[in-house]
Image: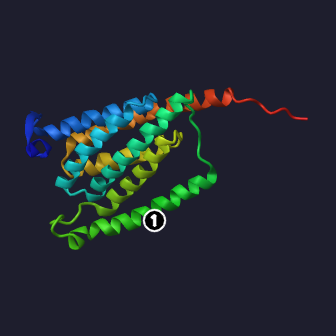
C-alpha cells in the first residue's frame, strides 16, 4: 500500500517525464481546491486536505522539508476554514473583506521572521534529526519564504480576506522555479496553472467585495 505514496510508483510517461500516482492525484486535487476557492465553494477545504496529504509524501521524498511541514498546517487550517465557511453559510453570510495597513505591517514582519527562522531550522534539520532527514534540505531559505507566505495566505483565505490572492500569486511564482529545479515538473506546471486561477480568484473576490461595499448602509452626514 505504501508504494502508492512513492514518487517511484510510475503510472505513465508524459514526453519522457515519469508520472507517479501520488503526484498526479495530489496535483488534480490541488487544482480543484484553488478553483473551488476562487468560486467561494466550501468544497475547497476537503480537496485541500487530500492535496496536502499527498504533497506531504512528495516533499519528504524530494527533501523540500519546509514545504513538507507546511502541509500539516494546510490540513489544520483547512479544517478551520471548513468550519468557518460553513458557519458563515448557516448565518447567511459570505463576506469578503480587506486587511488594514497595520495588518500589512504584521504580514511583512511575520514573513521576514518566519523565513529566517524556518530557513535556519530546515538548513540544519539533517543535523538535528539525522534519523528522519538523512540529507540536507534543498533551497532551504527560498523554500522557507514560499512556506511562510503560504501560511499567511491560507489563513487570510480561511478568513475571506481579499489579499490572500496577492500572496498566493507570489507563492506560485516562487514555486514554479523551485519545483522545476528539483525535477517535479508536473507540480511546476500545476503552480503555473494555479497562478492563472489565482488571478481569476482575485478578480472574483474583488467583485464580491465591491458588491458587499455597495450594499453597506451609508451613514448620513449632518
**Would residue 100 be found to the left or right of residue 70 on screen?**
right
Give 95 or 193, whichever is nearer the viewer: 95
**Would residue 40 be found to the left or right of residue 8 on screen?**
right
Give 122 or 85, whichever is nearer the viewer: 85
Residue 175 position in % (x across, y down): 32, 48
Q: Residue at 28% of width from left, 68% of height from top?
A: 123
Task: Say if 186 sits above or below 67 in the image.
Answer: above
Quarter-of-image position of residue 143: bottom left
Residue 195 position in % (x across, y down): 38, 38
- Secondary structure under the numbered disc 1 in the rendered image: helix
Disc 1 packing (10 Å; few <14; some 14–19; many ≥20) = few
**Would residue 201 be found to the left or right of residue 130 on screen?**
right
Residue 171 position in % (x across, y down): 39, 48
Q: How many marks?
A: 1
Give 133 or 207, whichever is nearer the viewer: 133
Residue bearing mark 1? 113
Task: Say if 129 sits above or below 44 in the image.
Answer: below
Task: Say if 137 sits above or below 15 in the image.
Answer: below
Q: Quadrant of the N terminus?
A: top left
Q: Quadrant of the C terminus?
A: top right
Q: Residue at 8% of width from left, 35% of height from top?
A: 11
Q: Residue at 20% of width from left, 66% of height from top?
A: 136
Q: Is residue 42 visible?
A: yes
Amino acid at each position: 500500500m505504501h508504494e502508492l505514496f512513492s514518487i517511484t510508483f510510475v503510472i505513465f510517461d508524459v514526453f519522457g517525464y515519469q508520472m507517479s500516482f501520488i503526484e498526479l492525484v495530489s496535483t488534480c486535487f490541488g487544482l480543484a481546491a484553488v478553483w473551488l476557492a476562487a468560486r467561494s465553494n466550501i468544497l475547497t477545504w476537503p480537496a485541500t486536505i487530500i492535496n496536502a496529504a499527498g504533497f506531504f509524501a512528495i516533499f519528504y521524498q524530494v527533501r523540500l522539508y519546509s514545504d513538507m511541514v507546511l502541509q500539516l498546517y494546510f490540513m489544520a487550517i483547512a479544517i478551520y476554514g471548513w468550519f468557518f465557511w460553513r458557519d458563515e453559510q448557516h448565518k447567511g453570510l459570505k463576506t469578503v473583506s480587506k486587511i488594514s495597513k497595520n495588518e500589512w505591517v504584521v504580514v511583512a514582519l511575520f514573513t521576514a521572521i518566519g523565513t529566517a527562522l524556518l530557513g535556519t531550522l530546515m538548513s540544519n534539520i539533517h543535523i538535528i534529526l539525522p534519523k528522519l532527514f538523512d540529507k540536507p534540505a534543498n533551497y532551504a531559505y527560498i523554500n522557507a519564504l514560499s512556506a511562510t507566505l503560504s501560511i499567511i495566505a491560507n489563513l487570510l483565505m480561511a478568513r475571506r480576506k481579499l489579499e490572500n490572492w496577492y500572496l498566493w500569486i507570489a507563492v506560485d511564482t516562487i514555486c514554479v522555479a523551485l519545483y522545476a529545479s528539483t525535477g517535479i515538473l508536473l507540480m511546476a506546471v500545476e503552480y503555473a496553472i494555479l497562478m492563472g486561477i489565482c488571478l481569476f480568484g482575485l478578480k472574483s473576490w474583488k467583485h464580491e467585495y465591491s458588491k458587499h461595499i455597495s450594499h453597506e448602509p451609508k451613514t448620513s452626514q449632518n
